Amino acid sequence: DWTPDIFVDATVSDLKDQLGDDQVVLGLSGGVDSSVAAMLIHHAIGKNLHCIFVDNGLLRKNEFSDVLKSYEGMGLNVKGVNAAKEFYKALEGLTDPEDKRKAIGRVFIEIFDAEAKKIKNVKWLGQGTIYPDVIESVSVNGPSVTIKSHHNVGGLPAKMNLKVVEPLNTLFKDEVRRVGRSLDIDEKILGRHPFPGPGLGIRILGDITAEKVEILQEVDHIFINGLKDKGLYNDVWQAGAMLLPIQSVGVMGDERTYERVVALRAVSSVDGMTADWCHLPYDFLADISNQIINKVKGVNRVVYDISSKPPATIEWE
Ligand code: XMP
């Protein structure tokens, strides 16, 4: 029978054999998978694991500093790299979602590669790949043709000439969470909603600017905090906000205003392949909408997405 404790013991012991005294580099994202992978490798080789956490400027509000703190608290050897400017520069003027993904992926690889080169004798790249990722990248379209550039870092190992170590590649998400609990990882990290690699970059429709990111971070923060405060966060599989590339009319005093529209999305799902929109309480939505419009300058309209997947996807891109 599979149990997380047995998995941890067996995997840590295998990793010790496999990695010996080698140096390993791993990119942390703040998500469940990379965090659990890092802790397993950390248990096997300690300080020989070098973690890198890149701020791409497209994370949630306060995410970079909060998550960095919890990683340090877990004893990980982690370097935070603030690269928001580089990402914004590469994204300037791009509106096509795949172009944006590619730009984000490319800059990530550049930054990560430059940081990894500072580590002496690094031989391995650790990754939090889980079983569904393995399946997805050899999708029905055949090997190497993915539905979209999901993980954004496919070219990394070859470019860096590193061997890959993926201790979670036989596990499903719920098993990864159980392994994480067995390793005593903070419930705040384990219980997090999935968050896409390109982050808010695929939730800002059209071109991305620092100003738009800031607006969306505020909106998202109000929504996610509200879900947590009302005890709804754990009933939702994934939630977030989209900044739409349109303005709509509003009134302020006796003036007409043209300001931004945001869409809130919350879904229930098992694996993200199909999803239903969450029937969040009207009172809750009313309160969140009021807070957003009152507190976030430049937004005068909030809509709630009531589409299921398929045919609508979770992200709006
Ligand atoms: P969609 O929008 O396709 O999303 O219904 C399904 C799940 O995948 C996430 N997603 C991404 N994750 N890089 C990622 O790492 C991406 O480019 C990307 N696009 C979508 C999305 O957040 C949802 O959980």
Image: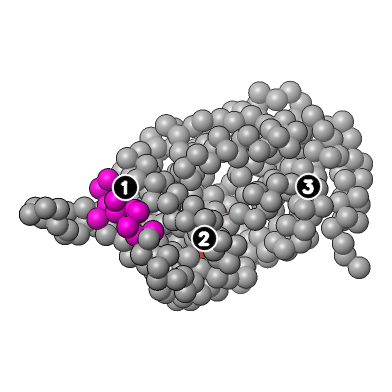
Residue 25, can we see it? Answer: no
Q: Residue at x 58, y 57 (%)?
A: 193
The response on whether ligand 1 sits within 8 Å of label 3 is: no
Location of mark 1 (residue): 296
Q: Quadrant of the C terminus?
A: bottom left
Location of mark 3 (residue): 184
| Real-space Cα separation, disc 2 to disc 3, in angstroms | 26 Å
| Real-space Cα separation, disc 2 to disc 1, in angstroms | 21 Å
Tell me which label, 2 or 3, sits earlier in the chain: 3
Q: Please report the bounds of the magenta region as a residue range.
A: 288-300
Residue 104 to residue 226: above or below: above
The percent position of residue 264, horizontal first and vertical second, equals 40, 62
Tell me which label, 2 or 1, sits earlier in the chain: 2
The percent position of residue 240, horizontal first and vertical second, equals 46, 57
Amino acid type of disc 1? Val
Q: Residue at x 86, y 39 (%)?
A: 44
The percent position of residue 162, horizontal first and vertical second, equals 72, 38
Give the colour scheme of this rendering: one colour
Location of mark 2 (residue): 230
The percent position of residue 29, horizontal first and vertical second, equals 60, 44
Residue in front for this viewpoint, 313 or 174: 174
Q: Is residue 33 left or right of residue 100?
A: right
The response on whether ligand 1 sits within 8 Å of label 2 is: no
Q: Is residue 140 left or right of residue 278?
A: right
Q: Is residue 64 left or right of residue 98?
A: right
Say which element carries label 1.
loop
